[in-house]
Image (cartoon, rainbow, N blue to C red):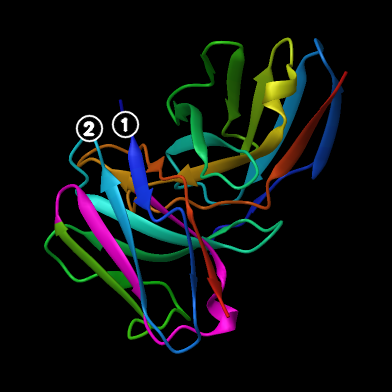
Amino acid sequence: GESVGLHLPTLSVQEGDNSIINCAYSNSASDYFIWYKQESGKGPQFIIDIRSNMDKRQGQRVTVLLNKTVKHLSLQIAATQPGDSAVYFCAPTGTASKLTFGTGTRLQVTL
Amino acid sequence: GAVVSQHPSWVICKSGTSVKIECRSLDFQATTMFWYRQFPKQSLMLMATSNEGSKATYEQGVEKDKFLINHASLTLSTLTVTSAHPEDSSFYICSAKEIARYEQYFGPGTRLTVT
């Protein structure tokens, strides 16, 4: 089945710096990708999505990059804030509508 | 928009009893809802997919007689944990999506503790 992995299980970033969270996926049939943020004791929160016909999408302080050739996604957070501390998941999906969650990356923002 | 609620947010029950968890889409019609469980410091594990008016589809290894799922309306799905045991203690999270859309929106989760 699908395997989704993250390159860095824990990422420590100083407040104000930019964060980059990476994600590799294996199923080339995935055509839609979502990044979620999960704070402790809460459900995942939708951050940004990207379709497979795009290679970049920007939101407020966040940018997602998609490289289908190497099956790699990244989430960039500009000017990281303490409130960004959480676990981040990338979740590829396709026509089956199921999301595949990897292990997640914990982002720690230091002051 | 795209708000999903869950009730209760936490519940403690005795071993052998049943517990019902509700998942509601508040501002959209959820043709499909998903139920996940999550153990501490682990990722979300999909338990089942339910389409409004149809029987739920369970993932491999999930006992359908133990985890009863009902999706009777476009805004409500319920998960009933029957004859709960301490090993069923977990964080249960639902998500919902509209027809023809990929985005899934998650509820805040329900922490179940079975004593």
Q: In the drawing, does residue A95 fall left or right of residue B93? A: left
Given contact means CB atoms under 8 Å apart, are the residues at marks 2 and 1 in contact? yes
Q: In the drawing, does residue A12 fall left or right of residue B54? A: right
Number of numbered markers: 2
Q: Which residue is mark 1?
A: B2
Q: Earlier in the sequence, mark 2 or mark 1?
A: 1
Q: Is residue A70 above or below residue A81?
A: below
Q: Residue at x 59, y 17 (%)?
A: A63
Q: A102 and A24: which one is in front?
A: A102
Q: Residue at x 58, y 40 (%)?
A: A90
Q: In the drawing, does residue B76 fall left or right of residue A99? A: left
Q: Is residue B25 above or below residue B19?
A: above
Q: B51 and A97: which one is in front?
A: B51
Q: Which residues are magenta?
A: B73-95
Q: Residue at x 47, y 22 (%)?
A: A54
Q: Which residue is mark 2?
A: B27
**Residue at disc 1, secondary structure:** loop
Measured from the top left, where is residue B36 in percent x and y? 46, 60
The amino acid marked with disc number 1 is Ala
Measure the alpha-carbon separation of dots 2 and 1: 6 Å
Work out whether disc 2 and disc 1 sit on a shared chain: yes
